[in-house]
Amino acid sequence: MLRIGHGFDVHAFTEGRPLILGGVKLPSERGLAGHSDADVLAHALMDAILGAMRAGDIGQLFPDTDPAFEGADSMALLSRVASLAREQGFSLVDADCTVAAQAPRLAPHRDRMRRAMAQAMGVDVSRVGVKATTTEHLGFVGRKEGIAAWAVVLLDKADAPWACGG
């Protein structure tokens, strides 16, 4: 049985925090505001996986009212979501992600993000795509007020274990 999941997240920029996207710390004067490490890309991917599983969203699984998740590493949370998927018999067929950021330039970091997220999920990097775009200076992203991310996943629920091969 194939299932598609879609995830979306957005976080505003803030001073005094590192910028982490897809599990990679990026050079930036500002980071993103959030209860965890505010990795908007990982959050969108987790929501896509949970959506395909019909298991709610990260706000239900890792509520921002729970002090246990304050400053949490989103790669650890992504790993937990992937484990939950495996436990329920799902395997990741493919994940495709898009990040909208006017700055910083993300293309040089794309492959590191793919590797970090694939490693957190225990899958081959070939199963994880990451694209970056700007909004041509339009909206909150274009005004450099924050970053948005979208993710789409295809899961298969079969007797096979969580897919690790290429």
Image: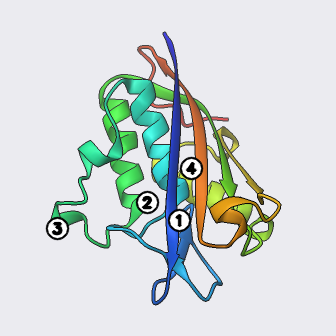
Instruction: Give the x, y percent position of residue 102.
Output: 74, 68
In this view, 8 is above or below 141: above
Nearer the camera: disc 1 or disc 3: 3
Q: Amino acid at mark 4?
A: Ala
| Residue 110, horizontal then vertical, whole percent | 72, 61
In the image, what residue occupies the spot 65% across and 54% down? 114
Q: CA distance from mark 3 to mark 2?
A: 18 Å
Residue identifier under label 2: 75
- Residue to which mark 1 is pinned: 23
Going by the numbered disc 3, the residue's amino acid type is: Pro
Residue 45, given in percent of the width and then of the height, sits at 51, 45
Dot 1 or dot 2, earlier in sequence: 1
Compared with residue 154, is residue 118 higher up or lower down, i.e. above or below?
below
Q: Secondary structure at mark 2?
A: helix
Marks 4/3: CA–CA distance: 27 Å
Left or right: 81 as drawn, with respect to 9 = left
Question: Which residue corresponds to mark 4?
Answer: 118
Judging by the rendered image, the residue that carries numbered circle 3 is 67
How crowded pointer 3 is (Cα within 10 Å; few <14, some 14-19, many 20+) is rated as: few
Q: Nearer the viewer, mark 4 or mark 2?
A: 2
- For the residues labelled 1 and 4, the Cα–Cα distance comes to 10 Å
Task: Name the N-terminal-most of marks 4 and 3.
Answer: 3
Q: Which of the two residues, 7 or 146, is positioned nearer the viewer here?
A: 146
Depth check, mark 3 against mark 2: the one in front is 3
CA gap between label 1 and label 3 equals 21 Å
Give the image quarter of residue 128.
Answer: top right
Residue at x-position 25% and y-position 43%? 60
Question: Which corner quadrant holds the C terminus?
Answer: top right
Lower sequence index among marks 1 and 4: 1
